[in-house]
């Protein structure tokens, strides 16, 4: 079934998340726990004040989604794909909390993460060139095999980035937080 320009609140998620297409829809206050979203497509949708925990995406596409004032726990976002390299799954993230989320394999070039918080999240093999993490609390979040060229980590805190396995050319960091880049090298700073 196709939904367009609808606002979706308070309906049982099981009825909405199998074989459905959503275009420019707004999801308000959705609380989804342990759900499987199958064979759906979300194009230009906005998710506001939603709380998701343990949601799994299966054969689902998402393009240009906006996430506002949401909390996401235990979500693997890398399974979502846009229609092309230019149409990314996420268009904007504003004031969201991500805990135990996995962003592996995602292309979020030039993405602005400022204003959100990440706890124990994983970024593996991600394209994050020019991404803005300025002032973001990254509470033990790890970056491995990522392209972080020209990314902005000024005033960010709590990140784990190994310069030996990530591309950091032109990335910006603040002192003294930049010292964290040396954590895995065995170098002692006194």
Image: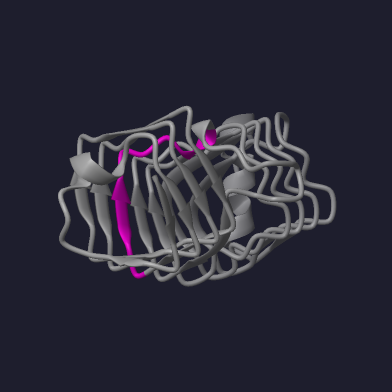
Where is 8 relative to 187, above or below? below
Q: Which residue corresponds to the image point at 45% horizontal and 36% vertical from the top-left?
A: 102
Give the image's coloring scheme.
Answer: one colour
> Looking at the picture, how far across and down is residue 7, in whole percent?
33, 69
Asked whether 77 falls inside the magenta stretch, the response is yes
Q: Which residue corresponds to the image point at 55% horizontal and 61% vertical from the top-left?
A: 44
- Res 173 → quadrant: bottom right
Where is 7 relative to 60, above or below? below
> Looking at the picture, how far across and down is residue 37, in whole percent?
34, 35
Start and end of the magenta stretch? 69-78
Position of 151 with respect to 114 (left or right) is right
- The answer to whether residue 137 is seen in the rendering is yes
Point out the residue furthest to the right here: 169
Q: Nearer the viewer, residue 87 or 43?
A: 43
Q: Which residue corresponds to the image point at 31% horizontal and 41% vertical from the top-left?
A: 17
Asked whether 95 falls inside the magenta stretch, the response is no
Where is 2 relative to 93, above or below? above
- Res 81 → quadrant: top right
> Looking at the picture, how far across and down is residue 57, in whole percent?
40, 33
- Res 95 → quadrant: bottom left
- The answer to whether residue 186 is seen in the rendering is no
Position of 155 with respect to 146 (left or right) is left
> Looking at the picture, how far across and down is residue 137, in whole percent?
44, 61
Q: Nearer the viewer, residue 159 or 110?
A: 110
User: Which corner quadrant holds the N terminus?
Assistant: top left
């Amino acid at each position: 079934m196709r939904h367009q320009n609808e606002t979706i609140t308070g309906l049982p998620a099981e009825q909405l998340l199998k074989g459905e297409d959503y275009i420019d829809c707004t999801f308000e206050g959705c609380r989804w726990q342990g759900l499987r979203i199958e064979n759906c497509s979300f194009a230009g949708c906005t998710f506001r004040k939603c709380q998701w925990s343990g949601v799994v995406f299966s054969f689902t596409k998402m393009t240009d989604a906006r996430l506002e004032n949401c909390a996401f726990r235990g979500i693997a976002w890398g399974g979502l794909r846009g229609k092309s390299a230019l149409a990314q799954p996420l268009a904007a993230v504003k004031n969201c909390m991500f805990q135990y989320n996995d962003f592996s394999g995602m292309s979020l070039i030039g993405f602005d993460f400022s204003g959100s918080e990440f706890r124990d999240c994983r970024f593996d093999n991600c394209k994050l060139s020019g991404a803005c993490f300025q002032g973001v609390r990254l509470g033990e979040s790890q970056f491995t095999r990522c392209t972080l060229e020209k990314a902005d980590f000024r005033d960010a805190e709590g990140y784990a980035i190994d310069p030996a396995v990530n591309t950091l050319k032109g990335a910006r960091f603040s002192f003294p937080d930049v010292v964290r880049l040396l954590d895995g090298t065995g170098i002692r700073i006194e």
